[in-house]
Amino acid sequence: MAETVPLLALDRVSAGYGPTRVLFDVSLEVNPGETVTLVGRNGAGRSTLVKAIAGRVARQGSIRLSGEEIGGLRAFEVARRGVAYVPENREIFADLTVEENLVLGAPVGKERGAMEGFAWSIAQSYALFPRLGERAKAPAGVLSGGEQQMLAFARALMGCPRLLLVDEPTEGLSPLMVQLIAETLVTLRDAGLSILLVEQKLDIALDIAARAYVLGHGSIVFAGSPSELRSCESIRRAWIEV
Ligand SMILES: Nc1ncnc2c1ncn2[C@@H]1O[C@H](COP(=O)(O)OP(=O)(O)OP(=O)(O)O)[C@@H](O)[C@H]1O
Ligand SMILES: [Mg+2]
């Protein structure tokens, strides 16, 4: 039987900022169509790991996408390979309208349709988030935090990604918005999108994901199923709960 090639495979990845090392020999995988969560305490290095995959920080070690090395690529090249990134701070263009932000996320020229990704359009963005359709002509800067998060998601999807990296999408949102973002992730997961999710709210993360990794001080300290992590109190107490 042929073995499935992981969509994303990190092998002993290290990264940091200048002389400060933050990640130490991190290995992890996301299989095609799988939602994987990465959890850990504040400062554990979760955002740095996602940035390392997205090409936003200098990194060593191997990062493969469907078997192809992408560890040496720059951020825009990683994006062109179909890795979409919803950053912690959303990176919305405040002076552009909602629709203009979405257009900027779409592939251009030769990239258009070149990827076997998750087909996506502005109309689908508005179907998924009706609120964005209502605010299509509004400057993105006037949107609420929750609406900006919807826009960050929709813009990432406009690139027709093979893999969606999401960094703490529910942070700072109202309970209602947290629920909406969680439901969105479930919708995307069920549509077959591959997702690597950093999420501080453990229950949400473990409800959505098929597998979980725990990052502690820049190293993977646990890898397993959500039910294993739920029942492993020592790991949770040592590396997740405050
Ligand atoms: N641009 C940067 N320059 C220098 N150090 C940084 C930078 N960004 C993060 N760090 C440091 O790297 C470590 C890991 O930060 P990171 O943002 O990856 O953690 P995290 O797990 O995402 O936590 P949180 O989201 O709660 O901040 C921290 O010690 C942080 O201070
Ligand atoms: Mg972070």
Image (cartoon, rainbow, N blue to C red):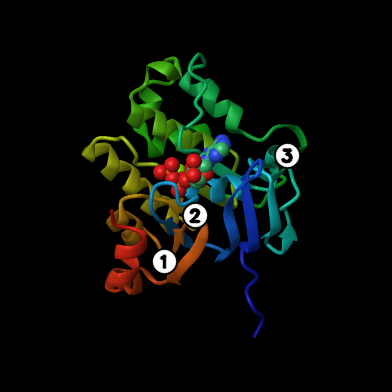
Residue 105 appears at what percent x and percent y?
Answer: 59, 32
Q: Residue furthest left?
A: 175
Q: Residue at x 39, y 72 (%)?
A: 225
Looking at the rendered structure, the kind of residue marked 2 is Ile
Residue position for label 3: 111
The N terminus, quarter of image: bottom right
Nearer to me, 123 or 90: 90
Looking at the rendered structure, the kind of residue marked 3 is Glu
Is residue 195 positioned above or below 32 on the image?
above
Nearer to me, 32 or 59: 59
Is residue 133 positioned above or below 174 on the image?
above
Disc 3 element: helix
Residue position for label 2: 195
Left or right of residue 237, residue 118 in this image: right
Nearest to N terminus: mark 1 or mark 2: 2
Residue 68 appears at what percent x and percent y?
Answer: 74, 60
Looking at the rendered structure, the kind of residue marked 1 is Ala
Mark 3 Cβ and ligand 2 under 8 Å apart: no
Label 3 crowd bin: few (<14), some (14–19), many (20+), radius 10 Å: few
Q: Residue furthest bottom?
A: 1
